[in-house]
Amino acid sequence: MADPRSAAAGRIRLWRERPDVFVREVLGVTPDAWQDDVLRAFPTSPRMAMKACKGPGKTGVLAWLCWNFLLCYAHPKIAAVSISKDNLDDGLWAEMAKWQNHSPMLTELFTWTKTRISAKESPETWFMSARSWSRSASKEQQSDTLAGLHADSLMFVIDEAGGIPDSVMAAAEAGLANTTGSNVAHIVMAGNPTHLEGPLYRACTSERRLWMVTEITSDPDDPKRTPRVSAQWAREQIEKYGRDNPWVLVNVFGQFPPSSLNALIGPDEVRAAMNRHAREDQYQHAARILGIDVAREGDDSSIIYPRQGIAVFPATVLRNVDSLQGAGATQQKWTNWNADAAFIDNTGGFGAGWIDQLRVLGRDPVGVHFASKASNPQYVNKRTEIAFDLVDFIKGGGCLPDDPDLLGELCAVTYYFKKDKVALIEKDQIKAKIGRSPDRMDALALTFSYPVAPRGIAGLTGVQTNRSNDYDPYARLN
């Protein structure tokens, strides 16, 4: 038998395009709704990540995708890893055996062993291998785990991805380099959101634009919850430990726990704001404010972020513009949107040219120095104050555009105490973390520099800089 798929040649094309049909016809199982979404997205999604609560069937989905890839592509190669050899053996590898036993076709065409699954007629070129590394392995040795795999049809599968080292993922990413012509390559990972660093965390935050991310919850009040986890059990855990308990967040809600004791905000809170949509009647009477962060270096971007009440609108991104061009773009946005005020970062004088040019054009922008004194004396400077105002806005029901770069920047920021005042880490520290300056976050935070009243309200028109200090910022840190 030259082609191990010949027994099902008439269905191969359909199963390749519709893995959800493959699962039903070959494995004899009906997937849950979220599992169907993952299966249908697989053929056109080179990078897939599943961030899951405890027990929704994510490892089963990984096994289904592996069997689909093995059967429906010619001479494919798959490498599978998990956080440990034992975890791989007991998890994904056991699932592969379980589902092979559900299908006489897969049993006939493939051989399962403890470290390798291969096509009986082409075992050297048509296989899935189990990979692992020793506990004492260096970063170089870890990266070798997935190195050296080459094929026209290539797949890397990472189970329990929350604790996978970055060096392992780097080797998998290299496998996507040759996806030209008819070549295909996929990275699929699944895990619980237990770690606040690593591949799964980045896929859900700073690299989200690169990944198709599926979030699975057992929240008993969520109509889209996984049916594989008892709603009664979930309610018991919430009642016993509380909704904000880190264990409940990870295992029941499938959410990352607080990034750290000194995190500005966590990714799930930001994503929730990005999934909210405001009605026009909820913000139409609020002031229209522009926040503008001016690029400091050649690889930074200048950002114009518009906000009206609880609604934030997509940013305008400008690269390699001078003061005249930047002011012109701001003037155009100001006019077209009929903005009530614009705040421009003038830290170090970088925004001075924009401000001068706008004044020539008849506008009155407000320059904001991040290092200047905060209106609230418990913050070390203006930058820290407006960043916490932005966080309060997000947690209080603000609606953000779907901006993965903004998400990554917000989640990279931490604060510390400088004597008795709260301070954010420096911008160059954030840039070292995520590889770019937090321009989007700064621009959006600038819209909170001072209160602004919309035009037409008697006695309140314009920027109000005499802010009240009758609230306690430490309350939001507890």
Image (cartoon, rainbow, N blue to C red):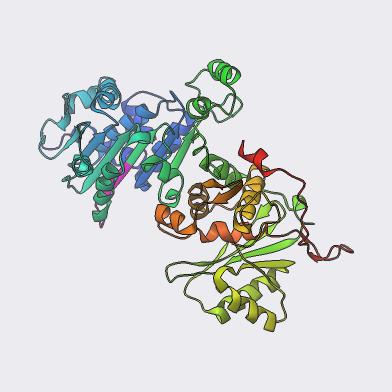
Quarter occupied by the N terminus: top left
* Residue 329 colored in magenta in the image: no
Can the viewer see residue 131?
no
Magenta range: 179-187
Can the viewer see residue 13?
yes
- Image side of residue 148 versus residue 69, left or right: left
The one nearer the camera, 202 or 58, is 202
Residue at image coords 53%, 40%: 268
Q: How many marks?
A: 0
| Residue furthest right in the image | 458
The one nearer the camera, 443 or 27, is 443
Q: Would you place residue 266 above or below residue 59 in this image?
A: below
Q: Residue 176 placed where, x, y %?
A: 27, 51
The one nearer the camera, 348 or 123, is 348
| Residue furthest front in the image | 419
Residue at image coords 48%, 29%: 250
